[in-house]
Amino acid sequence: MDKLIKSISDNGHFRAFALDSTETVAEAQRRHETMASSTVALGRTLIAAQILGALEKGDAKITVKVIGDGPMGLILAVSDASGNVKGYVKNPDLDYQRTSTGEILVGELIGNGQLIVIKDMGLRTTYTGQVDLISAEIGEDLAWYFLQSEQTPSSVGVSVILEENADSVKSAGGFLLQALPEATDEEIAQMEKQIKAMPALSELTIDQILPAIYGNLTYKILEESPLAFYCDCSKSRFREGIRSLGPAEITAMIEENHGAEVVCQFCGRAYHFTEVELNDLLLEKSDL
Ligand SMILES: [Zn+2]
């Protein structure tokens, strides 16, 4: 099962998260049948959303949009504070050669554009932050977002490695390191040096990530919790969606298609509505 580990340095100057998101990204790949580059771009965005969700509490919902002018098109992920994430990529079919180390670069396929983060804290309170993409490899862009929008010096890693000669996901994970207000410039510089010297994320197990980040700095684990790809869609929600189209549209569905099929864009699940079910909707409508 995928896992998030939250930690804080004993001196209280830094916090760090380590994420194993292998199953999350594997599930997204299977549901959307994405090819190599699209899998990596979507996977990194899902991990970024899980990192942002891990910073929240309660019923908060986070939406991450990566909007570039390249062939990838929009990448969208929605996460919560409980480790759930769902999402999709506009173009699931980009399949490019990977580099010799097995990593796939997606920046050129995403192109120039923006990273947008929308936080819905409930009670109609939303916060939106936006930065220009730096490299469009997602990790660096999220670190830039934390610095620009939240004034928090941060280092972010997001990694998706695919099986050789296959589109399936071998491993996926990430980390977040953030300087807290008490951290001095000297300490931040030291941590940055350590992060640069760290082995590639794909070479570390989740239990090796935090020791690699902190180096000699002592820290304590605050919490371990599960992460998962999870879509909260349901037939009743899509039923409401069809109802809102109005009687003329519903009548057309009955007469032309003798039913309706709706596919959830977040998870690919298909919901079928029979002629009888659509007729029931029309009857309910006339009750109003
Ligand atoms: Zn769904």
Image: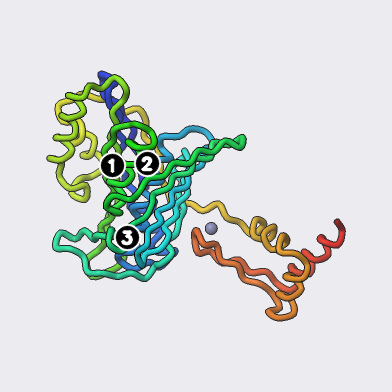
Say whether disc 3 or disc 1 marks the residue closer to the N-terminus.
3
Instruction: Answer few, some or many: residues within 10 Å of disc 2's Cα (few below 14, many 20 plus, some between 14 and 19).
Output: many
Q: Which residue is mark 2?
A: 51
Image point (31%, 59%), residue name? 40
Amino acid residing under circle 1: Val
Compare residues 153 and 82 and report the one nearer the observer. 153
Q: CA distance from mark 3 to mark 1?
A: 20 Å
Is there CB contact under 8 Å for labels 3 and 1?
A: no
Is residue 195 rendered to the left or right of residue 95?
Answer: left
Q: What is the x, y in percent for residue 39?
A: 34, 62
Q: Which residue is mark 1?
A: 156
Instruction: Answer few, some or many: residues within 10 Å of disc 3's Cα (few below 14, many 20 plus, some between 14 and 19).
Output: many
Say whether disc 2 or disc 3 marks the residue closer to the N-terminus.
2
Is residue 260 rendered to the left or right of residue 12?
Answer: right
Q: Furthest-right residue in view?
A: 287
Indicate the secondary structure of the residue bearing disc 3. loop
Q: Nearer the viewer, mark 2 or mark 1?
A: 1
Amino acid residing under circle 2: Ile
Is residue 265 rendered to the left or right of residue 140?
Answer: right
Q: Which residue is mark 3?
A: 111
Q: What is the x, y in percent for residue 32?
A: 43, 65
Q: CA distance from mark 2 to mark 1?
A: 9 Å
Q: Please tell me in which quadrant of the rendered image residue 185 appears.
A: top left
Q: CA distance from mark 2 to mark 3?
A: 23 Å
Image point (61%, 35%), residue name? 123
